[in-house]
Image (tube, rainbow, N blue to C red):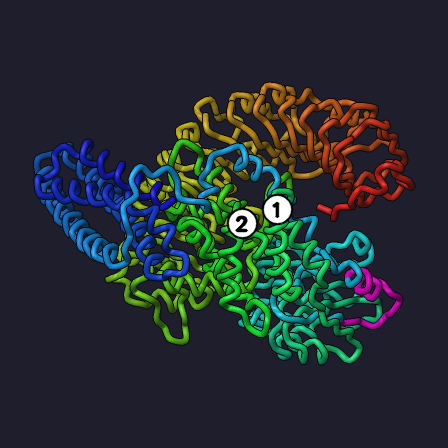
Amino acid sequence: MVYAFVSFAVKSLGNFLIQEVNLRLSLREEVQWLQNELLSMQSFLKDAEEKQVGDHRVQQWVFDINSIANDAATILETYSFEAGKGDDDESANRLKACTCICRKEAKFYNVSKEIRSLKQRLKDISRKRKTYDIRSIDNIAGEGPSSRPNNRSALARELRRTTSYMDKQDLFVGFKDVLERLLAELVKAEPRRTVISIYGMGGLGKTTLAKNLYHSPSLTNIFDARAWVCVSEQYNTMDLLKSIIKSIQGRDRETLDLLEKMTDVTDLEKHLQDLLKEKKYLVVVDDVWQREAWQSLKRALPDSNNGSRVIITTRKADVAKRADDNGLPHNLRFLREEESWELFHRKLLDFKAMIPAMEKLAKDMVGKCRGLPLAIAALSGLLSHKRSLEEWERVKAHLWRHMEDDSIEISHILSLSYNDLPTVLKQCFLYFGIFPEDRQINPKNLMRLWMADGLIPRGEERMEDVAQDFLNELIRRSLIQVAATRWEEVTECRIHDLLRDLAIQKASEVNFFDTYDPTKHSISSSCRRHTIHGQGERYLTLDFSKLNLRSVTFFDQRDRKLDRIKFRNMFHHLYVLYLENDCDTFTLPDAIGSLYSLRYLSFTGGYDIPSSIGNLKNLLTLQALDADTPDINFWLPPEIANLVNLRHLVVPYREPLLHINKLTSLQVLEYICCDQWRDVNPVDLVNLRELRMKYIKESYSLNNISSLKSLSTLELLCKDSGESLPALEFLSCCQKLQKLELYGRIEKLPPFPNSITMMSLWGSFLMEDPMPILGMLPNLRDLQLGYRAYSGKEITCSDNSFSQLEFLHLEGLWDLERWDLGTSAMPLIKGLSIHYCSELKEIPERMKDVERLKER
């Protein structure tokens, strides 16, 4: 896959030579030499990819080639942008023209200097190639058995459809008895607040068990308030208290403003106590490392003798046993032999293809995992991509060399799983180490970061689809965990602490990124990516003059001075700028427009975006991280229309965005208001796939949406459930529409296109049974009738209806009393969710054995 990156760099260099016809001869020769040398390097990449497993030096060589290819493209982008500015000046008058000539000479000098630096790096790499005995392999057709994610086959496309549910079935192999026992403790008639502590070594599944308890349908109506907070080894008590308060009270503007004013732990404790004292609550405190961390939260969780419960997960037995005098510590056991084998075979990609000799090898290796679920899952993910008996034997031989006490050390299984990845997937995996510990990660944000940072090869297929394949592959290899799904997509993912530690270790070995350490007040000068998890203001006082940074990510910042960043001097060549700031007074400074290489910009807080943002011609993603927060609306300048390469615009804004139809590369447009859409002519938005519109009003026409010929996902949301959606007949013209969500009153269901596979209706207040119409949609696989979607008392699903339906969610249908189901209806149903349908006394007999899904 590195081959794809080098190919792109070679192509960019060739295009540069063609377009820049007036280049000085010396510079042209430098660029030509660089192009030829990279072209030569391509023939060595396959051999290097195959040799890098177990050889850190070769692995570093591959990473270096990839880095040079990306740097070459960056240099050309920088030069082209600066040269373009000069051309504008040149047309003004002779004086400006003379000035521009001087500027262009300086640009020639700078780009020559940078290319000479790349030449030296390539010469060093060539020398190392001979030292490491990396040989040329001509006529490269692929990158070996681990290149599956880059294969644009039907299998890859199928992975996109199935990945989100693949982890569901094996979440709890072997622990159903534990789940039932702990559920009984949570619901028993004990008025005192009870603490249930789940403890055991890393990789046993403590957090997974806690999540299943937390989301159990049997607890839905028992607790008035619920909250989940991750503590981790490095924690801040104020942050933990604020997180619990936000979970219970919400994230509206009033709550956020109140919390920002609270600067003392005592004030937060008192506020949380007042919030919970009249409520029966369930709070999960995940990943506690020290008794002090729990004690600091315990004071704020009142015991009102109303049956409240707390669940703690920890690796430390003393933390679990001393958490509470009335507590119930549970030492999570290892899987038994038969349970271990069941987990392995459920995780294996193609269990049926395993011949007897392979099965014997697998049972030997699974047995040496000693019942540790994380190790078994990783082993299964690794072997899924080995097709022959010989490959399985090599895996076993490698693991047997690292046996300790007749069992496989988990670190060796995880390392082998990492080493088996192609280079580009290694880089995508390492990116998870950039995020703070225990962070729930939004996959869309992650994949957009990958794209902006140059980790996704450019080709005929959409980068978004390639990135999705990469994420699916990491999930299938059990290196990444699925935390939440919706509409056959992963909506939240996470990485296990042990795998995150591995990502950080491997990233350090190849200088992939560095995390700012405020205690040392230093950071690596050789890393192109910096991540800051605290004290961002202090980080900005470092000397950046000799750094050529590619990516800077600020997490959980509380600094009011981040808007004073000297962008031009510090982050001149930046691709990625991620600003997660709890301070809502933060505003983007005008200097943001000087980051002409920027491809990804995400931020929180503030309301105005400067007009200089129109300079960022390379920007792919512009995103407000707090876009879901009510009452957050930005002012977008008209210069946004200059961002001709913008693919993802996820920013709620106040005023109509003029000339939005110029953004012809746009793939995703979210949080646009109906007021902004009514005057839009979307005929030129030929690439728009996803549209989310809020504050819909009945008086506005949405008929022009039918002009979006590539639209596959549409969400239309009224501000309140009592408001009505406008006429929806245009939907029948959206022939590529697959996913549809409607929130608002609908007098009568419109004609839907047959292409729809997922549908969600909320607050529709339909008086006629919607099932006869919806049941005839030939491709519908997931249907949700949410809060007040239907106000009738009976639904009827006739014979042969819902032929493809797999998941049905009935939630908040307060008047529903009866459900008639034909004998041949819903033949493929896999999951059923029924919540807040209090008048529905009985479900069809055939549905009683269908798996119950948690509330959405």
Identify the residue at horizontal 52%, vertical 55% (top origin): 393
Q: Residues within 10 Å of mark 2 (few under 14, many from 20)?
A: some
Q: Is residue 528 left or right of residue 655?
A: left
Q: Quadrant of residue 740?
A: top right
Asked whether 823 or 631 is in front, the reply is 823
Residue for badge 1? 355
SS at badge 2: helix
- Which quadrant of the figure contains the N terminus? top left
Q: Amino acid at mark 2?
A: Leu
In three-dimensional space, the C-alpha distance between marks 1 and 2, rounded to whole angstroms, equals 8 Å
Q: Earlier in the sequence, mark 1 or mark 2?
A: 1
Q: Is residue 149 magenta?
A: no
The amino acid on which the numbered mark 1 sits, given as a three-letter code, is: Ile
Packing grade of label 1 (10 A; few <14, some 14-19, many >=20) is few
The residue segment tinted magenta is 179-195
Residue 447 visible here: yes
The residue that mark 2 highlights is 389
Residue at 62% from the left image edge and 60% from the top image edge: 364
